[in-house]
């Protein structure tokens, strides 16, 4: 009888551990220059198609835009091209969040990505003032509950109060904060990220042309209770390596059995991974015992 009990316990432990499969959250960095023509916009379509084609293989659970989806704020032709590219995610049943950058007019992003397109989705959490530029999404992956909140370009105090309220109301959910611009010491970091113990990650873009280091950055912060928070910036729009206006995507594959999140960078023009230390690396994050 004891042998049977030991066998049952062993099988239960095996299935419990093996049930934690890897899963992926992807990001689409600034696409502003590619939105300006039909020819260049095909690159945006290919960037997003990578996640559609690999939905099952990578267990893709969510895709987040990092803003500057367009170049000329209110250009309907640019928004139409971007909408066409992102429609692939909706058609494939992959949840995603658009993001408003400094080159994206709030009026236009709400016209082309209205709240009504998202509110029937099981991942929809809600938004500030019923506008898409400040919205949050909830999803479950391998038994873990996540809350991803997308904030507008340089949100005011009302936006920060709203974001903090959402994170405070969901302390048990694993928080991801996304905005077009997050830099060390800037308001979104000091007033939102480090103020919330459940935020473990932030994702941003924007800065490739502003700082010489550009392209990719990673730094950590600590929340009030001392938890490590992983902050990652990716922006390839200058195209200073591939000369393709930024047709590079980043994915974060969560590995629960190893308690780590691994970043991978894929250029869709040449179809190659960047394997330098800034482009491919892993971050410790506790997901399973």
Image (tube, rainbow, N blue to C red):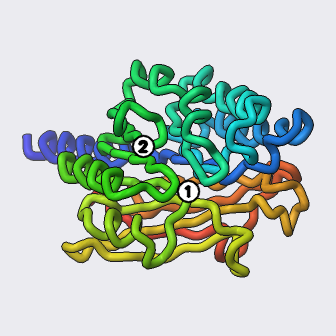
Q: Is residue 125 above or below residue 214?
A: above
Label for residue 134? 2
N-terminal label among 1 and 2: 2
Task: Estimate the x, y position of residue 130 in percent, counting from the top left.
Answer: 38, 31
Q: Secondary structure at mark 2?
A: loop
Quarter-wise, where is residue 266 in the image?
A: bottom right
Question: Crowding at label 1, few (<14), some or many (≥20) Cα neighbours within 10 Å?
Answer: many
Task: Estimate the x, y position of residue 28 in percent, counting from the top left.
Answer: 64, 48
Is residue 189 or residue 46 the one in the foreground? 189
Task: Estimate the x, y position of residue 235 in percent, counting from the top left.
Answer: 68, 62
Q: Is residue 288 left or right of residue 205?
A: left
Is residue 77 or residue 26 the one in the foreground? 77
Is residue 196 or residue 62 the one in the foreground? 196
Label for residue 180? 1
Answer yes or no: is residue 51 visible.
Answer: yes
- Quarter the N terminus occupies: top left
Residue at 80 percent of width and 63 percent of height: 238
Quarter-wise, where is residue 248 in the image?
A: bottom right
Q: Secondary structure at mark 1?
A: loop
């Amino acid at each position: 009888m004891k042998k049977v009990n030991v066998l049952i316990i062993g099988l239960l432990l095996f299935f419990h551990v093996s049930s934690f499969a890897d899963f992926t959250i992807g990001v689409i960095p600034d696409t502003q220059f590619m939105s300006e023509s039909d020819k260049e916009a095909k690159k945006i379509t290919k960037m997003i198609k990578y996640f559609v084609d690999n939905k099952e293989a990578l267990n893709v659970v969510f895709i987040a835009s990092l803003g500057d989806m367009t170049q000329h704020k209110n250009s309907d032709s640019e928004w139409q091209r971007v909408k066409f590219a992102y429609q692939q995610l909706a058609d494939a049943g992959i949840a995603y969040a658009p993001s408003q950058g400094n080159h994206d007019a709030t009026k236009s992003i709400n016209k082309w990505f209205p709240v009504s397109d998202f509110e029937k989705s099981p991942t929809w959490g809600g938004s500030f003032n019923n506008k898409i530029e400040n919205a949050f999404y909830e999803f479950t992956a391998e038994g873990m509950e996540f809350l991803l909140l997308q904030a507008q370009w340089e949100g005011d105090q009302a936006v920060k109060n709203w974001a903090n309220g959402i994170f405070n109301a969901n302390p048990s959910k694993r928080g991801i904060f996304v905005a077009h611009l997050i830099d060390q010491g800037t308001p979104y970091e000091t007033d939102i990220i480090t103020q919330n113990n459940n935020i473990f990650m932030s994702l941003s873009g924007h800065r490739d042309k502003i700082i010489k280091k550009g392209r990719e950055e990673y730094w950590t912060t600590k929340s009030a209770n001392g938890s490590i928070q992983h902050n990652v910036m990716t922006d390839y729009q200058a195209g200073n390596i591939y000369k393709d206006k930024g047709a590079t995507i980043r994915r974060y594959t969560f590995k629960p059995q190893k308690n780590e999140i691994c970043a991978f960078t894929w250029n869709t023009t040449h179809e190659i991974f960047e394997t330098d230390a800034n482009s491919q690396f892993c971050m410790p994050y506790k997901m399973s015992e």
